[in-house]
Amino acid sequence: MQKLALLGGTPLFKKTLKPCNSFGKEEVKAVTNVLKGQVLSGFLARAGNSFLGGKYVKKLEKDFCEYFNVKYAVSFNSASTALQAAVGALGVGPGDQVITSPFTMSATPSAVLWNNALPVFADISEDNFCIDPKDIEKKINKKTKAILAINLFGNSPDYRQILKIAKKQNLKVIEDNSQSPGAVSGGKLTGTIGDISVFSFNFHKAIQAGEGGILLTNNKKYAFRAQLIRNHGEAIIDDLYGENKIYEPILGSNFRLTEIQAAIVVEQLKKLKKLNQQRIALANYLTKRLECYLWLIAPKVAKNNVHVYYVYPLRFLKEKIGISRKTFAQALSAEGFYVAEGYQKPLYLMPMYQKKEIYPNSKFPFLSKEFSNQAKYEKGICPVAERMYEKELLFCTICQKPYTKKEIDLFCAAVKKIEENVEELKKYEKKK
Ligand SMILES: *Cc1c(COP(=O)(O)O)cnc(C)c1O
């Protein structure tokens, strides 16, 4: 029996690999072309063609429309601002509620708050860590306007049920697809299922441009409202009112993407399929090799779904092995494979929600005449999300470049080594 590195043995894997970076000469050439043209942004905040951006921004949006077979794509300087615009495009505002998951990046529910509406948290499913349709139904009331679902870790929630609920209750659906470009849910590409979807291009997402995001929709009005929000809405609204008097005023800001970033994303989109395929192949290989462990649950992929493994999530069942998640994570990290514990603390437990305060001397919009004390953020409202955060969830990035099958074999050897040494680890835990 090999001695564990955590207990003084030799680690199985000693190298440190730099995280995945898919930039190549294509991106360098694209940026050079933009610089040669010397137009780094083609936007103007007034009525006319430049209101929609420059050459590369328009090319990027056209490419996304083709790739995802949607009518409209509106680029943004981040997924966070795209989410803010998505909520605004639906016309959601004070007095409205949006049901979302607490197991996501803070930007998702913040997009609701930026529109002065209230995020209501529904629990997640332990099978995919995404919002659970059964709990959505319980959280609907007459103020609910939309469901903001997150396609987490490369996977997606049960949209068949979500769309059924939305139709029955007359709710709109937004997909936060920041982590799952190229994934499939019920046979359809994620990002094409809801009324509006949002993607991220920040530096650690699958499509990378430093910063950036995009919004997709088939609804002309939503697309136009999103374009207004992106580009100082009121500046052009005045002109449009004069022309045809059809558009409502809207609050906008500068959420525009630069030409350089757009040119990079055009190249990155071409690489998406291949990068996804590489991650899927490694993840499938790993999942197969972990089947023998009852205490370590590999990701589940529902029928007609494709998981693109932005990260590779695992569930750790303490009662089936007898050591804590922390000890397991430490032992695995000591062998050379860093695993993160818990992902995101369920967001309602963060101070902003606990204190119900985002402005000094005001509880708006959490407690206001629009909401008559309806913001419920106490511990226990989403027990599955809390259990994943506190006890079960682990994730790693070994299913992506530069890792290969060779490192996955070593990862599996480390898991095996930990199981073989579990009695030693129990003693180690007692001593601490
Ligand atoms: C990264 C991320 C965002 C925010 O993306 P930015 O482009 O950095 O603003 C939003 N939602 C989820 C689920 C994310 O992972």
Image: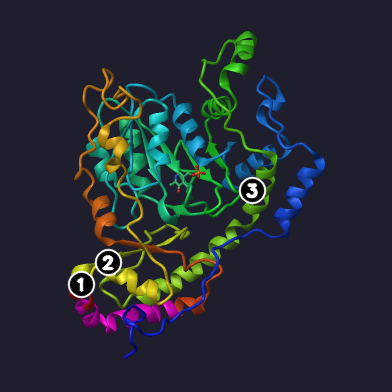
Q: Residue under label 1, please give it.
A: 320
- Classify mark 3: helix, strand or loop: helix
Q: Which residues are magenta?
A: 410-427
Residues marked 3 and 2 touching at CB (< 8 Å): no
For disc 2, the neighbor class at 10 Å (few under 14, some 14 to 19, many from 20) is: many
Amino acid type shown at disc 3: Val
Q: Residue at x 42, y 57 (%)?
A: 304
Q: Residue under label 2, please give it.
A: 325
For disc 1, the neighbor class at 10 Å (few under 14, some 14 to 19, many from 20) is: few
State whether the magenta stretch is mostly helix, strand or loop: helix
Q: Nearer the viewer, residue 110 or 184?
A: 110
Colour mode of the rendering: rainbow
| Vertical comparison of 184 with 218: above or below | below
Inspect the magenta stretch and tell me whether residue 401 lies in it.
no
Measured as percent of width and height from the top left, residue 276 is found at 54, 61
Determine whether, in the image, residue 26 is placed left or right of residue 337.
Answer: right
Q: Which mark is residue 265?
A: 3
- Classify mark 1: helix, strand or loop: helix
Quarter of the picture containing the N terminus is: bottom left
Q: Earlier in the sequence, mark 2 or mark 1?
A: 1
Determine whether, in the image, residue 319 is placed left or right of residue 409.
Answer: left
Measured as percent of width and height from the top left, residue 318 is found at 22, 68
Amino acid type shown at disc 1: Lys
Q: Residue at x 37, y 40 (%)?
A: 163
Q: Residue furthest top?
A: 242
Q: Earlier in the sequence, mark 3 or mark 1?
A: 3
Q: Nearer the viewer, residue 240 or 201?
A: 201
Inspect the magenta stretch and tell me whether residue 422 lies in it.
yes
Q: Residue at x 35, y 77 (%)?
A: 415
